[in-house]
């Protein structure tokens, strides 16, 4: 990738871990560069959004569920189930990491996401 922030990026297999690590450290630069290198606008990431700014009722429900599951912190994987997320399931992708953490499988692709992007990745690695 040509972005200067990505010059330190590890091998492709570790890319997701690297990007997540940088985001959690408060450095969105590598993720922004990844999007910009692909000719896309980078996403807006807000780790403490105001629920009232969410226009879609299902997203407000998801926000509330997420907060309740984690008690203010990200919830543990076992507590994030399709049943608990049902009011907002169309807006959710659930992913399972491989044993070594270098890959992931789409456990579930929400119907609204599939509709928007025209592709259902459920079950795919």
Image (cartoon, grey):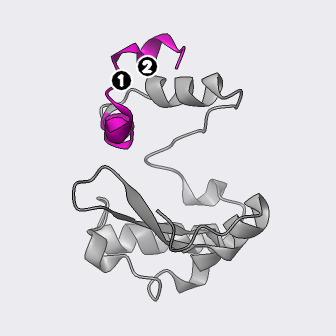
x, y percent for residue 52:
62, 59
Q: Find numbered disc 1 in the image and state the secondary structure of the residue it sits on.
A: loop
Relative to 51, is 42 above or below? above
Q: CA distance from mark 1 to mark 2?
A: 5 Å
Asked if labels 2 and 1 touch by Cβ distance under 8 angstroms, the answer is yes
Relative image position of residue 92 (x, y in whole percent): 56, 69
Disc 1 target residue: 9
Q: Which residue is mark 2?
A: 6
- Identify the residue shown where x is 44% and y is 49%: 48
Q: Residue at x 32, y 60 (%)?
A: 74
Name the spot of residue 14 as percent of width and height, x first.
Answer: 31, 38
Residue name at image x 66 percent, y 29 percent: 38
In this rendered view, identify the residue nearer to me: 12 or 75.
12
81 falls in the magenta region: no
Q: Nearer the viewer, residue 29 or 98?
A: 98
Residue at the bottom extreme? 83
Q: Judging from the image, what secondary structure is the residue with disc 2 in?
A: helix
| Residue 53, quarter of the rendered image | bottom right
Pick the residue in front: 92 or 72.
92
Looking at the image, can residue 61 be seen?
A: yes
| Residue 18 drawn in magenta | yes
Residue 116 in the figure: left or right of residue 10: right
Highlighted magenta segment, given as a residue range: 1-21
Whether residue 23 is visible, yes or no, is no
120 sits to left or right of 84 = right
Q: Would you identify the image quadrant in which residue 67 lies?
A: bottom left
Residue at 30%, 32% in the rendered image: 25
Residue 73: x and y in percent read: 29, 59
Q: Is residue 58 left or right of residue 83?
A: right
């Amino acid at each position: 990738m040509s972005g200067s922030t990505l010059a330190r990026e590890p091998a492709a297999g570790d890319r997701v871990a690297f990007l997540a690590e940088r985001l959690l450290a408060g450095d969105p630069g590598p993720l922004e560069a990844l999007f910009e290198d692909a000719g896309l606008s980078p996403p807006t990431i807000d780790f403490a959004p105001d629920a009232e700014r969410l226009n879609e009722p299902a997203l407000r429900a998801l926000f509330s569920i997420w907060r309740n599951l984690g008690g203010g912190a990200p919830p543990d994987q076992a507590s994030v189930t399709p049943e608990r997320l049902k009011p907002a399931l169309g807006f959710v992708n659930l992913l399972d990491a491989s044993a070594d953490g270098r890959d992931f499988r789409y456990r579930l692709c929400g119907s609204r996401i599939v509709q928007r992007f025209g592709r259902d990745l459920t079950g795919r690695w």
